[in-house]
Image: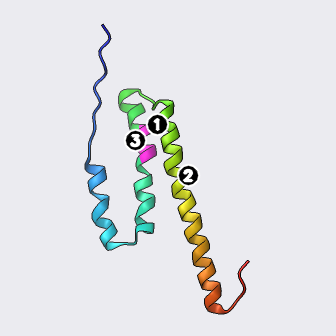
Amino acid sequence: MDFPRPRVQCGGHRILPKPSVRIADAATVAPFEYIGLPLAVFWGLVIFGDLPVWEVWVGIGLILGSGLFVFLRERRKLRSRSSHRRGGATS
């Protein structure tokens, strides 16, 4: 008989970063939240000898890709605003 392996889940890492958004800008806190993805994979491998299935890797790629997209878009907006304030042309 094949029994499913137990999964251990700790929710503290999802609760603690939230108050920090009240203190700092979300763009400053976001990279610290993204570090949870590789750490979860690392500790899952070290403690349980488990690697995520391909669906999880796709989800990780979507999360990281969307975060990168938003980061680059906001950086472009910031550059555009700063060049308008100086009176320069945008490219």
- What residue does disc 3 label? 40
Q: Residue at x 58, y 67 (%)?
A: 73
Is residue 41 shown above or below 88? above
Label 1 crowd bin: few (<14), some (14–19), many (20+), radius 10 Å = few
Looking at the figure, which quarter contains the N terminus?
top left
Q: Tell me the magenta residue range.
A: 37-42
Q: Is residue 66 above or below residue 43?
A: below
Residue holding disc 2: 65
Q: Quadrant of the C terminus?
A: bottom right
Q: Nearer the viewer, residue 68 or 50?
A: 68
Dot 2 falls on a residue whose secondary structure is helix
Q: Position of residue 60 (x, y in %)?
A: 49, 43
Q: Depth check: give the residue in front, 10 or 43.
A: 10
> Three-letter amino acid code at disc 3?
Ala
Residue topped by disc 1: 56
Disc number for residue 75: none
Q: Nearer the viewer, mark 1 or mark 3?
A: 1
Q: Position of residue 77 (x, y in %)?
A: 59, 75
What secondary structure is found at the residue carrying circle 1?
helix
Badge 3 density bin: few <14, some 14–19, many ≥20, Cα 10 Å: few
Q: Amino acid at mark 1?
A: Val
Q: CA distance from mark 1 to mark 2?
A: 14 Å
Measured Cα–Cα span from mark 3 to mark 2: 18 Å
In front of the other: 43 or 87: 87
